Amino acid sequence: MPSNAARIVEHAALGNLPARPGVSFLYDGEPVQGHEGEPIAAALLAAGFRVFRTMPRSGDARGGYCMVGRCADCLVVVDGVPNVPACVTPVASGIAVQTQHGRGEAEWAGFSEPSG
């Protein structure tokens, strides 16, 4: 079960938050513990990770900013799919999450560039 040290377990308005089952996933090849259904960003932040992607030109680090899926600062690669917003995507057992570098590489399996 993941530690609650960096998680909100008691909320001023909501009271005590119910416990949820723990899940394991990988972030850049490193095992991370999360709670079922929480956003990937919440699990990463609780585990001490602050950088989720780097900017295309400058390479500057980015992490959680708006935390509601509007900005793009928390985009990660999930199971090979780039541009996934970590702040609104629920963590799931066994997923592989990676830091996204730049714009991400689109996967076009089964598709080819139009000719002509």
Image: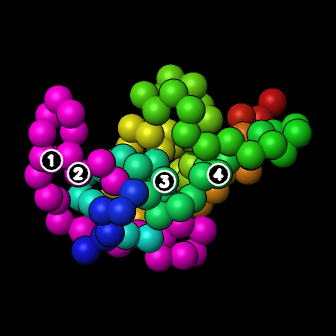
Of helix, strand and loop, which one carries label 2? loop
Q: Do callouts 2 and 1 mark residues in contact (Cβ within 8 Å)?
A: yes
Q: Quadrant of residue 25?
A: bottom left
What number is the disc on residue 45?
3
Q: Amino acid under label 3?
A: Leu
Which numbered circle lies on residue 17? 1
Q: Amino acid at mark 4?
A: Val
In space, the residues marked 4 and 3 are separated at their CA atoms by 9 Å
Residue farthest to the right, as pictured: 58
- Residue drawn 64% across and 56% down? 99
48 is higher (above) or lower (below) than 60:
below
Residues in magenta? 7-31
User: Could one spot residue 79 in this view of the protein?
Assistant: no
Q: Residue at x 54, y 76 (%)?
A: 30
Name the secondary structure under disc 1: loop
From the viewer's perspective, is 99 left or right of 59? left
